[in-house]
Amino acid sequence: MARSLLSTIAAAQRDANRARAARSRAQVAAVAQAQRAQAAAVREAERARAALDRAARADARERARLYAESRAADVAAYNARIEQTLSDLSSILATALATDAHIDLDSLKQPPALPA
């Protein structure tokens, strides 16, 4: 009976050691899994940040392109307005030169009214 009690205690100790070792392995595995998850989260955050940077650069390029197009359209509108003004001035000049605009200055003179 003594032998069986000692063997029972030894078996219980072995079982306790095995359980402790299993808990330790499970804890190590859980820590490793948490570290892998954290590393994956960091990598994903870096990917998201890089994607955001790429999108911001693309947005800046698009805004610059749209600004350049807007300025080009403004310049074209100003040029058209200038051409229209030049055309109007040319037609005014041509019309003025084509008409006889002689003014007889003598007819505009009024004799002075002298006191008597």
Image (cartoon, helix red, strand yellow):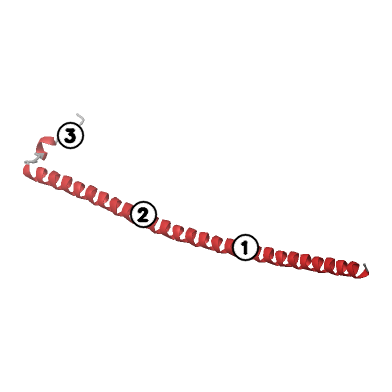
First-in-chain label (2 vs 3): 2
Residue 37 locus on image (x, y percent): 61, 62
Using residue 30 as the reference point, say whether residue 3 is left or right of it. Answer: right
Under mark 1, the amino acid is Gln
Above or below for 69 versus 92: below
Would you name the residue on which mark 3 appears?
Answer: 112
- Closer to the camera: disc 3 or disc 1? 1
Residue 6 appears at what percent x and percent y?
89, 69
Residue visible at 62% across and 62% down? 38
User: Label 1: which residue?
Assistant: 38
Q: Earlier in the sequence, mark 3 or mark 1?
A: 1
Q: Is residue 91 above or below residue 57?
A: above
Question: In the image as oriented, which residue stretches furthest toward the right?
Answer: 2
Give the residue type at disc 3: Pro
Residue 67 circle label: 2
- Camera-nearest residue between 83 and 18: 18
